[in-house]
Image (spheres, rainbow, N blue to C red):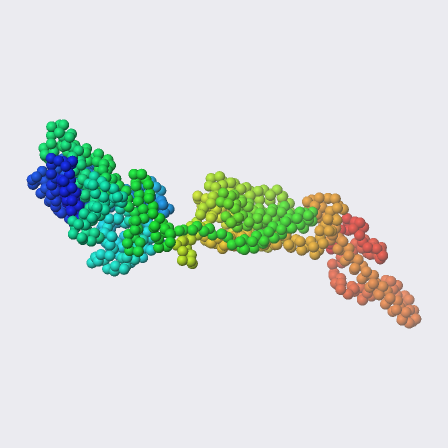
Amino acid sequence: MSGGWPGGQACMPSAQMALDLVNNRSDILPDYELELIHYDSMCDPGEATKLLYDLLYTEPIKIVLMPGCSGVSTLVAEAARMWNLIVLSYGSSSPALSNRQRFPTFFRTHPSATLHNPTRVRLFKKWNWSRIATIQQTTEVFTSTLDDLEQRVKEAGIEISVRQSFLTDPAVAVKNLKRQDARIIVGLFYETEARKVFCEVFKEKLYGKKHVWFLIGWYADNWFKIKDPAINCTVENMTEAVEGHVTTEIVMLNPETVRGVSNMTSQEFLGALMSRLGGKNPEETGGFQEAPLAFDAVWALALALNKTVAPLKAKGRRLEDFNYNNHDITSEIYRALNTSSFEGVSGHVVFDAQGSRMAMTLIEQLQGGSYKKIGYYDSSQMNLSWFNNDVWIGGKPPADRTVVLEEYRLLSQKLFASVSVFAGLGILLGIVCLTFNIYNGNVRYIQNSQPYLNNMTAVGCMMALAAVFPLGIDRHHVNRPQFPVVCQFRLWLLGLGFSLAYGSMFTKIWWVHTLFTKKDEKKEKKKQPLEPWKLYATVGVLLAIDFLSLMIWQIVDPLHITVEKFTREAPKEDLDVLIQPLLEHCSSEKMNTWLGVVYGYKGLLLLLGIFLAYETKSVSTEKINDHRAVGMAIYNVAVLCLITAPVTMILSSQQDASFAFASLAIVFSAYITLVVLFVPKMRRLITRGEWQSEQQDTLKTGSSTNNNDEEKSRQLERENRELQKIIQEKEERVSALRNQLAERQAIRNRRQPTSGQNQNHNAPPPASQTDPKSLLPPPGYPNPTADNHSLPPSFSNSSSLYPADSKMSRNHCHNSQIPLLYK
């Protein structure tokens, strides 16, 4: 037999001790004496190749090869089949060696490194970790182990968030672990590289109560205290960095006091081994932990060879007939090893189908600078034996990641309540305006303002104001499944409310511009009546466009909830948590496209409204007597909308600012529209009392106020009454002046002498004389002109037409006199 023994300070004495015991047993190979020929390959595949050549081509013939470390075993086991040799390793853990097609004659008493992985996965589940990170030295054994771990954690629903590797310098890999917020870290590297890794871990502060490291358990117990010129960290630094880490290691020494096939307990074996080592410190003796495996490897080989004696004898062959071309003896040895089962000093020895040892896993934790056993795990039985003595720096196992608490950004309730109050008052104002307009619908001044369009404006303003309420509703008020309904209310109330309110005002200003701004047709069109159905049809077209566009939007790309994530925030307290701010939006897959279409159409409509309002500012018409107020409302609404729409899109991530801009724009637009359109009408009707006289006139005439002739008749009658008052005042003034003139004339006649009377006897009668002063008009009247216009006979004697004690009434005014009253 031959082999390469890594650090053979402990393994070689252990194997030799087993060989001596075997040779002293009369029941095992009584006719044979086993000889151990050994070389130290120093785990160097190149050196192992040279030694393998020497072993194979020097006498005696070797029947079994027993390499130690994985690198040498890979080389030896792949070449051994060419010489029909069985390979039995005591220290190889590489998962790659479990490949039966590549290594058909390989066995090992050291379990595969993948046996650690079921234990690790079980511990991850025990401590509720679902996210881990890994760092490995770039060698085949660790790469294949990590590939197996990745497959197992994937099946267990655990995520490997970071996977780092290094060849000689782990500095960059450790920094990447910190950058990725790694908390639970599995490290796969040899002992010398472990010191380099944890020196960098200390520098990056990647240890403590927030981190847990999982390492391989076959390092020396004081590996972190050994001075290493390759690192620049002190022993204190290293001790601080490694505190609390967990190791998993195959059980290499039977924990129970059981006498196995060698008739020795595990403790007796350790005593005999220490005697052979001459009292050396086990922690400073290389291969000390693998010594029980080397001991049991020799026993497994001896028992297998002993088992082949009878079958070979039945075939007429003996073990000494073996040569490198004899396949039958190799097959018998393979069969015997594959069925091995016995109690050794390392525990129960049995091989699986890949030739790997099945064993329990020991779990240890570094507590206060020394390793403490905290449990065992039997992967074959899936049984975890836990001692409940694990210790954590933070008092409990750390979280596998920085705990991220989702926190939804909600609208300020004070802001929502304040704006809601204004919106509610606006709706009440709209109801008042609508009631006023309907109640006074028979008043001609209200009729000339197209009251049905004003009613639409009031309803549209109330709908827009009602949209403020769903605009401020979030998950504070409704559950998530109900939120899409709120989104629909927002869209439809605001869309249709705008169409009614602005559409009715736009219709007025459009028809005023159409009928009264063309100079050549201005006079004829003023005489034409404005048909109301045209106004209603225009509003209906605008409303239908909005309705169809919103309906298509909701059918093709309906609104749903989207959640916007913001940069994580750290709380003020020293907690291992981060706050993930979230904000819910009403959105659709192609939200920007739909908003672009709607905003583009509405924006053009607003700009056109501003243009038409400017063009018609000097137009005066009684058909739509409030078009100037409509123009003013359009100015304000357009400016507010054109400013608010882009601002709210920019501030969409700031819920309070976005709601404030949008809702206040709606509130101000509605208030301005209602106040500008309805308050002047209320003021006029209240201060002038027009609604009373108009209603009385309507009751007397019993005619329809929509008839143009009736409107003209009532207007003439009212003007006739005013003129009658003026004429009455003038008649009274003329009568007083005539009386004064007659008195003056009587006084003058009494003063004339008698002679004067005789001299004037032949003069024309006084009645025929004309005094120039008497022909002057009374004070306040213009002088007579030369046009010689004279009053008609009906006005020659006003006293006969209008008695002094009577007043002219509407009933005494003949139709022929009406035109003359306007002169």
Q: Vertically, is 692 above or below 63? A: below
Image spot of residue 249 (x, y percent): 26, 46
Which residue is situated farthest in the left direction here? 59
Foreground pick, 408 / 39: 39
Foreground pick, 733 / 649: 649
Q: Which residue is drawn at the image coordinates 28% and 42% (left, top)?
A: 360
Quarter residue 766 falls in: bottom right
Q: Quadrant of the N terminus?
A: top left
Foreground pick, 809 / 446: 446
Q: Vertically, is 322 above or below 91? A: above
Q: Is residue 231 visible?
A: yes
Q: Which residue is drawn at the image coordinates 57% and 50% (left, top)?
A: 465
Q: Is residue 112 visible?
A: no
Q: Which residue is drawn at the image coordinates 25% and 40% (left, top)?
A: 348
Q: Which residue is drawn at the image coordinates 30% and 47% (left, top)?
A: 363
Q: Specify whether 90 is left or right of 533.
A: left
Image spot of residue 103 (x, y percent): 19, 37
Q: Vertically, is 751 above or below 184? A: below
Image spot of residue 192 (x, y percent): 22, 53
Quarter residue 744 falls in: bottom right
Q: Specify whether 214 is left or right of 515.
A: left
Image spot of residue 557 (x, y percent): 46, 41
Q: How many numbered circles are shown?
A: 0
Q: Quadrant of the C terminus?
A: bottom right
